Image (cartoon, grey):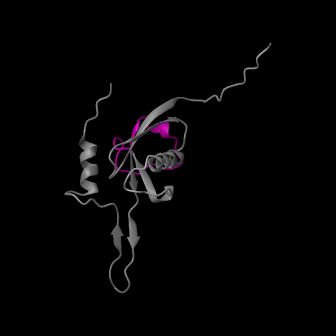
Amino acid sequence: MLMYKGKKNQVTGNRLLISITVIGSAGPIRFVVNEEEVVGNVMDTALRAYAREGRLPVLGSNISDFVLYCPIAGTEALNPLEAIGSFGVRNFMLCKKPQVVEEVGNAKPVTVGITRKNSGSWKSWFNKSLNMKVSSH
């Protein structure tokens, strides 16, 4: 009896284990992606994994409400159309975009972002995380 062996799904390019830290969450989300995968798809996968794991705070699934940062590369948000492997790093940070809520009358618009109930703010936490040295094995 001759057995037919079908082709497996072949992935072109290298695969990377990436770690995405969500501000305000307990720990990073880790998953494997193709290095040619675009940043927008990686953000979508991270938000789905975050929701599937039932993490808090609840974020939602609209990727246009979030930005992905590479703490080593600087404070500029990554372009959602670039390949994730083009940055040469595997650790990223997912942050919610600040929302502008306009007041009625002559008051200035107020920016609403992620807040923390304990001491410190997300900005100070972000700056501290940029200064941390991460050793690789």
| Vertical position of residue 62 compared to residue 52: above or below | below
Which residue occupies the extreme right position in the image? 1
Q: Quadrant of residue 37?
A: top right
Question: Residue 78: x and y, percent?
Answer: 44, 48
The chief SS type of the magenta part is loop
* Quarter of the N terminus within the rendering: top right
| Vertical position of residue 89 compared to residue 98: above or below | above
Magenta region, residue range: 70-92
Which residue occupies the extreme front position in the image? 1
Residue at image x 46%, y 37%? Answer: 31
Question: Residue 89: x and y, percent?
Answer: 40, 36
Question: Residue 117: x and y, percent?
Answer: 24, 60
Residue at image x 45%, y 33%? Answer: 17
Which residue occupies the extreme bottom position in the image? 105
Q: Is residue 104 left or right of residue 85?
A: left
Q: Quadrant of residue 87?
A: top left
